[in-house]
Image (cartoon, helix red, strand yellow):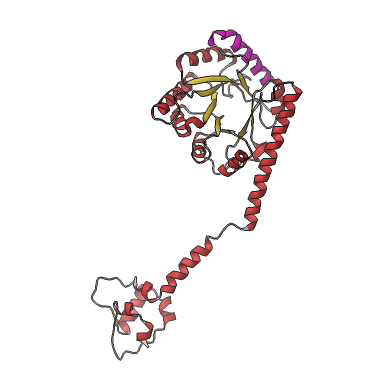
Amino acid sequence: MINNIFSSTAKQHFTIVPNSIVKITLASTLLLSRSTRYAAARSFSFVPPRTSTPVAPCRQHYFPHIITNKKMSSATSASAPSEESTADDTAKNSLIVTNLESVKERIKQSIAACNRDADSVRLVAVSKTKPSSAILTAYNAGQRHFGENYAQELASKATELPKDICWHFIGPLQSNKANNLVKTCGDGLYVVETVATVKLARKLNNAVSLAVAEGLRSADKTLGVYLQVNTSGEESKSGVSLEGVVGLAREIKETCPHLEIMGLMTIGYAGDVKDFDALVDCRRRVLEEGADLGFDESSFELSMGMSGDFEVAIAKGSTNVRVGSTIFGERDYSNLKK
């Protein structure tokens, strides 16, 4: 009976003593711990040979079905997504496309109401905290300009999404993160919209220079920047003062050859047009007082307007609107990478 239970492989590990009465069944052996099985083997004349081969691996020779069952169990637990999950993802993607088309239509109507050129307003889809899959859905629907608020999140997404995406960095940027952001995004980093100090501008300029030297960014591609203006005058708000914009623009023009000042940017209160009016007036002053800086009036931009007020911003002259939740839905900050 014992010879039938144990394979020839097993016999290499155990010496079977003749005329022994074995009362341990296969089932009970499986339930015993290693130390208990060893003690039981000694008691019932299962004498291990004098070899360096450990006892524990013998389980794989005696009872291969145990290992197989465990593997089968693991494979079963890693099952494919349920039909319900797939349907939910499909619905979310469909909603993103529908929302995107709706926003584009609203922009088109706002432009027509102002008698402006059809291509005079750029839509930036703000995708902060959203997964790359959501961005790819909008990309496949024709969207190319996307905005991110956090350097680490943008760097991560830029490495896994199509290279022809034009990334707008629209959040506060620490100068010590400028180098990694520029190098990681390469030519995909289209513009940093939140430049308010010469220090940050120089960090970005140096980062572009290094990226070009290392072959990570095209030599003929300058990095666009908007000068962020504190149009409300509140100390708690980010941005250069209205009075300091021309001076900042001049210093960047003179010391940062790898940067291109594309225009001005502000973040105003939803529904409050005073910030929009202030930025429009600031643009006029920059073009007049900084006439020697060579800005083209027809292409010097205004980045203003978000989900709640982009149509008002367009009516006031915005050329770059940043729309997020209206396209992608409410944000989830639980897995945020800053």
x%, y% of residue 147? Answer: 58, 32
Task: From the viewer's side, name the closer residue of 17 and 144.
Answer: 144
Is residue 332 in view from this perspective?
Answer: no
x%, y% of residue 211? Answer: 42, 28
x%, y% of residue 209? Answer: 42, 24
Is residue 180 in view from this perspective?
Answer: yes
- Residue 315: image quadrant is top right
x%, y% of residue 184? Answer: 46, 34
In this rendering, the answer to whether 335 lies above or below 224 is: below
Q: Is residue 23 left or right of residue 147?
A: left
* Magenta-highlighted residues: 272-293
Who's the residue at 50% across and 66% down the image? 73
Who's the residue at 70% across and 31% down the image? 308
In this rendering, the answer to whether 222 lies above or below 142 is: above
Who's the residue at 63% across and 53% down the image? 86
Q: Residue furthest right?
A: 113
Q: Is residue 285 magenta?
A: yes
Q: What secondary structure is the magenta-colored segment mainly?
A: helix
